[in-house]
Amino acid sequence: MSVKRVSRCLVLLFLLISAPVYAVPEIQHWVSPQGGRIYFVPTEGLPLLDVRVVFDAGSARDAEKFGLAALTSGMLDTGAGDWDADAIAQRLESVGASLGTGVSRDTAWLSLRSLTHPEKLGVALETGREILARPRFEQKDFDREKNRTLLAIKQRGEQPDDLAEIAFFQALYGNHPYAHPQEGFTETVEPLTREDLVDFHKRYYVAKNAIVVIVGEVKRADAESIAEKLLSGLEQGAVSPALSAPEPIHSVETVKRPFPSEQTHVRAGLIGMTATDPDYFPLYVGNHILGGSGLVSRISEEVREKRGLSYNAYSYFMPLREAGPFQVGLQTRNDQAEEALRVALKTVKDFAANGPTDKELEAAKKNIIGGFVLRLDSNQKLTEQVAIVAFYNRPLDYLARFTEKVEAVTREDIKRAFRSRVDPDKLRTVLVGGGAK
């Protein structure tokens, strides 16, 4: 046997032995005395702790005040308790900790990374607790952040890709809470006041509306104490009410918006699936073949490789608490936009009707399973994955059984799922570009 072949065998053996270490984390779950849902994964090897506190407080909770959730989340660490932004930064830096906040359509979160040394961890947790429970939202900070948001919205209006994305969600979701962009619009952000942020925080940043994910080298008793400390300053409150389901799409619609650019940005799709959809795995694996695997996907092959109509063409599902979108996207020269769109949609139609080949399915499974370990190869990544499992109420063994579920997908599963979910005769299409008019 050649040296190269021996080396390949050893590498394969190593991957087979080591993959379960990352791919099968044990997720422990309980409810804190304050009513928060806690998810804990103990790890070994590094004296580090990653924590993510997630609230059902994303932009879908903006009501008519689009941009409110994002502005609230963005201002949490500008001052809290007795500390201004500089004092918060100095406290975290002094113990080697880091903190971040973010928002999506469904969630708002605070992430915290710290060494597990008791004194250092104590400072980091105390800082995180104050930021969650006692943000200042000082008027001068609010005015500054609001102006930054308005400037970002103005700059967004100069980006045809951003405009296409916004128009696409509006075309799909109409008046649903998923329809508007997270940062809102100029006309919805300008009227916002500091009191709006205070009220939003009081309503949604409460213990019963919180999920705490803890990953790191600590014991279960320590994890319980950490969760209680982080939530101790919050009101108990209540869980956010359920969102309404999006209205089904019954007909094709095309939106064309002129923009002074040499490229046309194209989006096409329909309302897809929830994060707990029973057809999640057939749709996930099927889309990997259709448009989710980069240059080797069907859409890229037809649009880019064979015809040179676009540098990048893709498709994806965005599973959310309520049904998120299925989207096909590409960017092409103005004079090629109609042809590129036609080719992409024909590819979707053919795939929905006939499904993948055996060879495509086998390659997709290998690619997905081979890449899955990379989602779990650090505490930080594992924390993010567990947070998704927790927020969307997926089974606790979701990560452990992921490869098994992928392996079980058949061609017939994909054909059935796509035929029932992706109707080419109901796609909503948005084109932004074509030059100024």
Image (tube, rainbow, N blue to C red):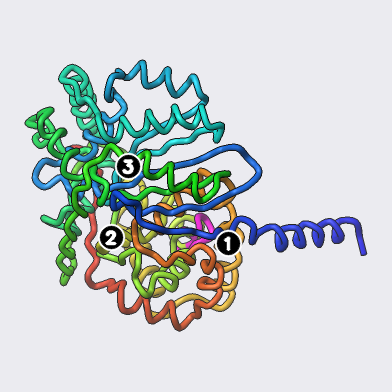
Query: Does residue 394 lie above or below 184 as drawn?
Result: below
Q: Is residue 13 left or right of residue 70?
A: right
Q: Is residue 195 above or below residue 7?
A: above
Disc sitting over residue 321 in the figure: 2
In the image, 237: left or right of 319?
left
Dot 1 amino acid type: Val
Q: Main secondary structure of the magenta part?
A: helix
Label 1 or label 3, whichever comes before in sequence order: 1
Question: Which mark is in front, 2 or 3?
Answer: 3
For the image shown, how many numbered marks are present on the structure? 3
Separation of disc 1 and disc 2 at Cα? 24 Å
The front one of 97 and 121 is 121
Q: Position of residue 74 (x, y in %)?
A: 28, 32
Report the residue marked by disc 1: 24
- What range of the chain is rendered magenta? 293-301
Report the residue at 47% width, 58% height from top: 28
| Tag 3 residue | 231
Please tell me in which quadrant of the rendered image residue 163 appears. Answer: top left
Residue 356 drawn above or below residue 326: below
Q: In which quarter of the view is residue 343 placed?
A: bottom left
Does 375 sit left or right of 434 as displayed?
right
Image coords of residue 65 (percent x, y): 11, 41
User: What separation in Å lies between label 2 and label 3 (alpha carbons)?
Assistant: 24 Å
* Horizontal side, residue 55 vs residue 291: left or right: left
Residue drawn at 58 percent across, 44 percent down: 217
Percent x, y for residue 122? 46, 30
SS of the residue at dot 1? loop
Residue 81 at x, y percent in the picture: 27, 24
Q: CA distance from mark 1 to mark 3?
A: 28 Å
Question: For the residue marked with disc 3, what is the amino acid?
Answer: Leu
Which residue type does callout 2 highlight? Answer: Arg
